[in-house]
Amino acid sequence: ANLVPLVTPCPSESLEALNCRRTHRSTMFVRIATIIVGLAATGADAFTPMTQRWTGQGRMAVRSEFKVTLKGPNGDLTEIECPPDKFILDAAEEQGVALPFDCRLGSCVACAARVGPEDIGNVDNSEQFFLSDELLADGYILSCAAYPTADITVETFSSDEVNARF
């Protein structure tokens, strides 16, 4: 049987250089295998999909998308799907739903919204800079800097309502 060598020497390559390349590849294989075995021993999953992310509350979001029900200023309901690694505002825009916004940095209140008491723990607000702890405890979020960690209902406001509330 004709076997194809894994390492093909160059015509000008010495036997010593060829053996060095083979040793290097063997060493790399052993290092990679050691890392994989170490990850498996600690319970870490090296092949976990990137859609999983740690939330600011220390829980892992394991679903690929969450249902976000947007309740508009007029009471109309719109459902969107939002991945756990995407801001609510971005997911809404991608699905053709217009929400108010200004800075997209979590440092103003143009995109302020509110979740009900049952959903306060189901939103990761860790990337916003404007809302106080009291406002967060009352369920206020900034849709430009909030990730869902479960299915939630979000009450959105008109620009006039945002200015009146803040």
Image (spheres, rainbow, N blue to C red):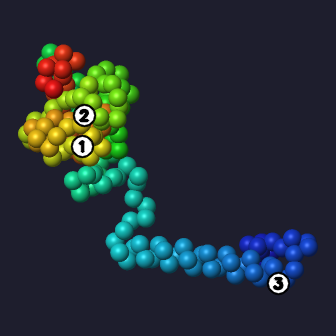
Badge 2 element: strand
Q: Is residue 93 visible?
A: yes
Where is residue 63 shown, x and y percent of the image? Answer: 29, 48
Considering depth in this image, is 108 or 156 the residue closer to the camera? 108
Q: State the CA–CA distance, disc 1 to disc 2.
A: 8 Å
Where is residue 118 shown, x and y percent of the image? Answer: 9, 41
Residue flagged by tag 1: what amino acid is it? Asn
| Quarter of image, res 88 | top left
Query: Residue 142 got which mark?
Result: 2
In the rendered image, which residue does mark 3 sit on? Answer: 16
Residue 115 lies, with reference to residue 64, above or below; the image says above
Q: State the CA–CA distance, disc 2 to disc 3.
A: 63 Å
Residue 97 lies, with reference to residue 45, above or below; the image says above
C-beta proximity under 8 Å, tags 1 and 2: yes
Task: Identify the residue at horizontal 35%, vertical 39% (top origin).
Answer: 86
Where is residue 82 shown, x and y percent of the image? Answer: 31, 37
Residue flagged by tag 3: what amino acid is it? Glu
Q: On the picture, is 42 further left or further right than 126?
A: right
Q: Say whether disc 3 or disc 1 marks the residue closer to the N-terminus.
A: 3
Mark 3 is surrounded, within 10 Å at the Cα level, by few (under 14), some (14 to 19) or many (20 or more) other residues, namely few
Considering depth in this image, is 149 or 131 the residue closer to the camera? 131
In the rendered image, which residue does mark 1 sit on? Answer: 125
